[in-house]
Amino acid sequence: MTARDAISGFAALSHPVRLALFRTLCNQAPQRASAGELAQGFDIPPSTMTGHLQTLERAGLIKAERRSRFMLYSLNPEGTRRLVRYLVDDCCHARPELTGTDEDAANAAALMQAS
């Protein structure tokens, strides 16, 4: 992933509706939903929702699939992993004590004491 790709991903997530929408699709994965279905949960017009979805899709965080006359949206797990990996690897040099779980941090501390 390039810096430009990462900036696009983070910019897409920087809007409150898009962040909430992304989290909704994460929680629903691998289920797909139309813009109209998603818009109902956010109390915004489907046309506005479509714009937010297109931004997330261009950033590679979600996927769109045409079914008849509807577009169905779902999480793009690989795009999401790439963005998270970019943040962790580039910003924190994959140091688990800074970015991982408590268990990762404990394992890293144990390895450092053993050496």
Image (spheres, rainbow, N blue to C red):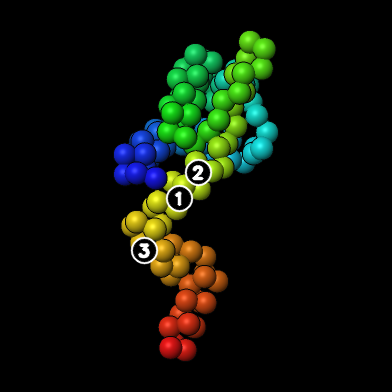
Q: Is residue 92 left or right of residue 42?
A: left
Q: Is residue 20 left or right of residue 32?
A: left
Tag 1: amino acid = Val
Q: Estimate how packed mark 2 is, as few (under 14), some (14 to 19) or many (20 or more) residues with alpha carbons within 10 Å.
A: some
Of labels 2 and 3, earlier in sequence is 2
**How far apart are labels 2 and 3 at the CA level?**
18 Å
Residue at 49% across / 36% down in the picture?
A: 61
Q: Which residue is mark 2?
A: 80
Q: Which residue is mark 3?
A: 93
Of labels 1 and 3, earlier in sequence is 1
Residue 16, x across and y down, in percent: 42, 34
Residue 10 position (above or below residue 34):
below
Q: Give the quadrant of residue 46.
A: top right
Does dot 3 land on a helix, a strand or a loop? loop
Q: Give the quadrant of residue 97.
A: bottom left
Residue at 56% across / 42% down in the picture?
A: 77
Q: Are marks 1 and 3 in contact (CB under 8 Å)?
A: no
Residue at 66% across / 17% down in the picture?
A: 67
Does dot 1 land on a helix, a strand or a loop? helix
Residue at 40% across / 38% down in the picture?
A: 9
Q: Are marks 1 and 2 in contact (CB under 8 Å)?
A: yes
Residue extending farthest to the front is: 1
Q: Which mark, by number, is residue 84?
A: 1
Residue 26, x across and y down, in percent: 58, 40
Taking depth in this image into account, of 100 and 114 the one nearest to the observer is 114
